[in-house]
Amino acid sequence: MDFIARSKEVFDSEIAELKNVREHIGKEVADVVDLILKSKGKVVVTGIGKSGIVGHKISSTLASTGTPSVFMSAAEAMHGDLGIVCKDDVVIAISNSGYSQEILSIVDLIKKIGCPIVAMTGDLNSELAKSATFVLNCAVTCEASKEDYVPTCSTTAALVMGDALATCLMEYRAFKLENFAFYHPGGALGRRLLTKVSDCMNKHVPFVQENTLFKDVIYEVSKSRQGVTLVYSGDVAVGIITDGDIRRAVQKYDDLKIVVATDIMTKGYKKILPNAMITDALKLMDENKITSLIVPESDSPNAKIVGVLHIHNIFDFKK
């Protein structure tokens, strides 16, 4: 077997089925989003087997993007976990066939609690679909495996439908990066999104005067280990010298003994305020193809410089 070719065929199959499912999307998606937005409770996602695994991911995505959600195993629901469900909740039940007995066994009980049921299924005529308040059509024509019974395309379709719901809800609520970070404080991404410039900037600000000799500029840059030094004219910062400026000076000047700071500095400098987020700093660095930012106390033209932020400070920072 050509495993490379077969892998590509699986991708082709799943992409084709996703396109088919996309064409089925209609007003019911808007109805479900509106239902969840108006709900005073949480979203309870339930399923069994592979659908349960997909449901767990959908619930996790909802919860981490501003929609309170929990996953409830359909099997465990019959043994006490149904207590998770409250009357103000919305229940999303996932079953490709729509005939999973574990799901069907709790449908009437959920209705008695008073919750609307959203069926995510591949059979619009199934018992689950007929019992639901709304149905999200995830029907696929085939699975990716040649035997056509291993859940592949069908689980992918349900997963993407869940992503579509979560994305609509997130964007309607204007869910921001900082909100996402709040729900992900333990990971590297969360730490970075929650971190401000003042948290990891170097408060020692290396500086030289305009007439400082080249050898003394090198000493200041080396001593600070930040790869930069500010250049002052009296009490005002007028420019910056980086490692790169020093390397270029070595190539440009034959007699470095007469070179002073103003000969090699870059006038002005890129700056960022202490209360800005690290994500903003990274974006500014990327846009300008630089690795350091100067941190003034305020937006005032002659504000005191209180720190230097190097890209290494960001990636080495531990919250």
Image (spheres, rainbow, N blue to C red):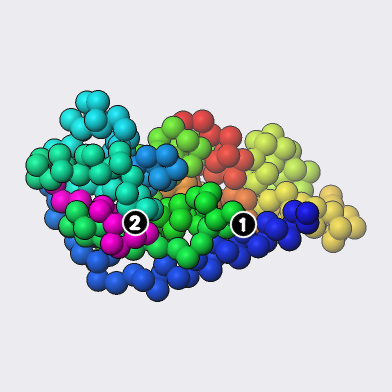
Q: Quadrant of residue 24?
A: bottom left
Report crowding for label 1: few under 14, some 14 to 19, many 20 or more residues within 10 A (C-alpha): few
User: Considering only vertical position in the picture, is 90 above or below 138?
Assistant: above
Tell me the amino acid under the disc marked 2. Answer: Thr
The quarter of the rendered structure image containing the N terminus is bottom right
* Residue occupying the point 57% across, 58% down: 144
Segment colored magenta: 115-128
Indicate the position of residue 176 as horizontal and vertical percent values.
Answer: 34, 53
With 289 as the anchor, is 100 left or right in this view? Answer: left
Lateral position of residue 62 relative to residue 212, left or right: left
Q: Is residue 262 left or right of residue 308?
A: right
Residue on which disc 2 sits: 121
Which residue: 85% across, 61% down? 252
Q: Residue 167: percent from the left, percent from the top?
A: 35, 58
- Residue under numbered circle 1: 146
For mark 1, give the secondary structure.
Answer: loop
